[in-house]
Image (tube, rainbow, N blue to C red):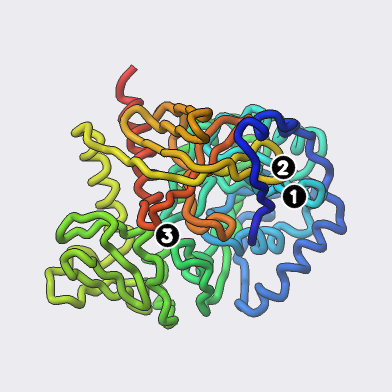
């Protein structure tokens, strides 16, 4: 999927009329039917099935907060099918509205900005359940998983649940990540997909619980490992491209410790510096094939080690990312605007973006957000890091194709945790 883009100067973009929020509108029966119908053909090919648990507790016309793990593009098709015929509103990032705002509002989308404090979103969600009496579908992780495990949940989730005062239902997908992991550049694998829809908490139970207790329940249920699921269930991914792009996740060699030297291609990932090579087997395991000692046999373990390495850099005061970038700005939903080049720096002081012939100079504190909107092959443009404010967002595309946006996300999360230790 692509996005509408325009070339424009930085100064002219700032003169554009900014996005103005609108209240959600009721999701009509036709749009619910259309979403389900457009999903039916693909899900049928995947032999899709859904197991329900405790759903008899949800009243026929009772709105709920549906939480779904974020694995791939098929997530929405799954949700549209299993929630039907109930009306529901999908919380999605504002860039998804570009060029399609009218349509997305009709099908029930509510815009937000990823990893930013968004009081408008909270008001829209309350309006949806209290006034429209309709449900909400939320991806609490906000971004796709990189390594197939759960990404951090915001501390504000429990607070939002208490304000909404409706039951919480979890939709957990199985096979969606194995079928289409983000790193694999939109190459679809032949994997069946299923889901489980589980009633987690009633409105009365939520009212009696503290915010921390709610968050504990949600984090427990949002603990998963898609690679481990694949191995335990012997789900074969036999395609010969299954390791393509895996260096986006496994970017640091555990043998020679060099970053940016890994290359995932075919069924293997290899370090071009020391020659270490691992096969990604058809069951999602790593097998060392170059004669060196196998340091990892599980993708998430390698990724967790990379997080530890980033944490060490932060504690030593040596963490630094600095990249020449192309900059796209989002200020409204008419288009996104290419404004030229710049430099993105990330260190213990946070992000610093400069560019547009010296006119752009933006700082973002590491205490600003618990995670980062970084993505692979964003709208078929390239790997991306997004920072900014609710009024202006900057999408930064490193000119160096070996730049590591996954490390920037890890560093953002670790800098946030590190900063919380101090006043």
Whether residue 30 is situated above or below residue 230 in the rendered picture: above
Occupied quadrant, residue 51: bottom right
Looking at this view, is 47 or 37 the one in front? 37
- Whole-angstrom CA distance, mark 1 to mark 2, is 6 Å
Q: Residue at x 58, y 36 (%)?
A: 393
x and y, in percent, of residue 246 in the image: 37, 65
Specify few, some or many for label 3: CA neighbours under 10 Å numbering under 14, 14-19, or 20 or more.
many
Residue at mark 1: 99
Q: Earlier in the sequence, mark 1 or mark 2?
A: 1
Residue 373 visible to the viewer: no
Residue 236 percent location from the top left of the image: 42, 80
**In front: mark 2 or mark 3?**
2
Which circle marks residue 333 in the picture?
2
Look at mark 3 in the image and give the residue it sits on.
148
First along the sequence among labels 3 and 1: 1
Q: Earlier in the sequence, mark 2 or mark 3?
A: 3
Whole-percent x and y of residue 261? 26, 61
Q: Is residue 346 or residue 110 the one in the foreground?
A: 346
| Residue drawn at point x = 54 percent, y = 42 percent | 340
Viewer-closest of 374 and 121? 374
Viewer-side label of 3, 1: 1
Residue 258, x across and y down, in percent = 20, 55
In which quadrant of the rendered image does the N terminus lie? bottom right
Do callouts 1 and 2 mark residues in contact (Cβ within 8 Å)? yes
| SS of the residue under disc 1 | loop
For the residue carrying disc 1, how many other residues have a C-alpha within 10 Å: few (<14), some (14-19), or many (20+)? some
Asked if labels 3 and 2 touch by Cβ distance under 8 angstroms, the answer is no
Instruction: Give the distance between the C-alpha atoms of the residues marked 2 and 3, in whole angstroms.
Output: 31 Å
- Above or below residue 169? Residue 84 is below
Q: Relative to 204, is 236 on the left or the right?
A: left
């Amino acid at each position: 999927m692509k996005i509408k883009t325009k070339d424009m100067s930085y100064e002219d973009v700032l003169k554009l009329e900014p996005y103005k929020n609108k209240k959600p509108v009721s999701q009509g029966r036709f749009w619910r039917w259309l979403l389900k119908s457009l999903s039916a053909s693909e899900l049928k090919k995947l032999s899709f099935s859904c197991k329900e648990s405790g759903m008899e507790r949800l009243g026929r016309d009772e709105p709920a907060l549906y939480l779904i793990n974020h694995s791939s593009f098929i997530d929405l098709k799954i949700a549209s099918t299993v929630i039907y015929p109930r009306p529901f509103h999908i919380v999605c990032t504002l860039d998804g509205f570009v060029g399609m705002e009218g349509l997305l509002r009709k099908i029930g989308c509510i815009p937000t900005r990823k990893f930013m404090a968004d009081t408008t979103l909270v008001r829209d969600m309350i309006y949806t359940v209290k006034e429209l009496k309709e449900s909400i579908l939320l991806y609490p992780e906000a971004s796709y998983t990189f390594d197939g495990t759960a990404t951090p949940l915001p501390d504000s989730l429990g607070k939002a649940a208490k304000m909404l005062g409706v039951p919480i239902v979890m939709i957990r997908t199985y096979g969606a990540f194995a079928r289409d992991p983000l790193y694999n550049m939109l190459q679809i694998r032949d994997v069946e997909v299923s889901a489980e829809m589980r009633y987690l908490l009633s409105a009365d139970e939520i009212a009696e619980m503290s915010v921390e207790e709610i968050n504990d329940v949600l984090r427990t249920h949002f603990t998963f490992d898609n690679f481990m699921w694949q191995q335990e269930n012997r789900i074969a991914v036999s395609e010969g491209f299954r390791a393509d792009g895996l260096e986006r996740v496994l970017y640091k060699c555990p043998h020679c410790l060099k970053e940016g030297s890994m290359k995932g291609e075919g069924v293997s990932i290899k370090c071009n510096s020391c020659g270490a090579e691992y096969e990604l087997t058809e069951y999602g395991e790593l097998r060392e094939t170059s004669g060196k000692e196998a340091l990892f046999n599980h993708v998430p373990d390698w990724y967790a080690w990379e997080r530890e390495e980033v944490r060490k850099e932060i504690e030593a005061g040596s963490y630094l990312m600095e990249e020449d970038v192309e900059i796209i700005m989002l200020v409204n939903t008419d288009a996104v605007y290419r404004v030229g080049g710049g430099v993105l720096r990330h260190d213990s002081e946070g992000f610093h973006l400069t560019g547009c012939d010296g006119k752009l100079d933006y700082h973002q504190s590491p205490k600003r957000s618990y995670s980062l909107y970084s993505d692979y092959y964003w709208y078929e443009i390239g790997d991306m890091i997004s920072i900014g404010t609710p009024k202006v967002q900057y999408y930064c595309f490193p000119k160096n194709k070996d730049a590591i946006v996954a490390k920037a996300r890890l560093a953002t999360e670790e800098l946030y945790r590190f900063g919380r230790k101090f006043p």
